[in-house]
Amino acid sequence: MSRLAEFRAAEKALQEQLAQLESLKNDAGLKKEIEFEEKLQGLMKTYGKSLRDIIAILDPHPGKSALPLSGAPKTRRARVVKVYQNPHTGELIETKGGNHRGLKAWKEQYGAATVDSWLRS
């Protein structure tokens, strides 16, 4: 890339960043955040507290927060084993889900509602 092309590209990038900066200056939400930060810094100075002190006050038990982190692995409750007994044949089927081959065959033959009534507690 020639020096002239490099200069023009840098100039164009600068103009885009200036335009973005100007739009941010007019953003009401940003103005409120800046005002909040200034007031918080003033309060911290008044009471001689640091940012760590504020965090310790707001979250006394870090790592044990009530809200789970979005990246944390979620644990599922273990599924309960269900036992179905066919009253016609006396055959038992133990399964944790409804994807059992024999259970599907029974539901096809006798109907899902009938087979669900065969569930032993």
Image (cartoon, rainbow, N blue to C red):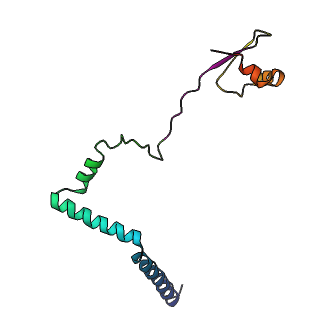
- Which residue occupies the foreground of this view, 87 or 3? 87
Front residue of this view, candidates 8 and 79 = 79
Give the residue at x 43% y 82%: 18
The residue that appears at 48% across and 87% down in the rendered structure is 7
**Residue most toward the bottom?**
4
Q: Which residues are magenta?
A: 73-85
Q: Quadrant of the N terminus?
A: bottom right
From the viewer's perspective, is 114 left or right of 72? right
Q: Residue 87 lies in magenta, yes or no?
A: no
Residue 19 image point, x, y percent: 46, 81
* Residue 65, percent from left and from top: 37, 42
Q: Which quadrant is the C terminus positioned in?
A: top right
Magenta residues, dominant SS class? loop
How many discs appear?
0
Q: Residue at x 18, y 62 (%)?
A: 45
Q: Is residue 86 left or right of residue 44?
A: right
Residue 25 placement: quadrant: bottom left
Query: Residue at horizontal 70%, vertical 27%?
Result: 98
Q: Residue furthest right?
A: 109
Magenta segment includes 78: yes
70 to 10, vertically: above or below: above
Q: Is residue 65 above or below residue 80?
A: below
Where residue 113 appears, as percent x and y from the top left, is 75, 23
Percent position (x, y) of residue 75?
51, 35
Q: Is residue 4 above or below residue 101?
A: below
Q: Give above or below for 89 relative to 21.
A: above
Between 20 and 88, which is closer to the camera in this rendering?
A: 88
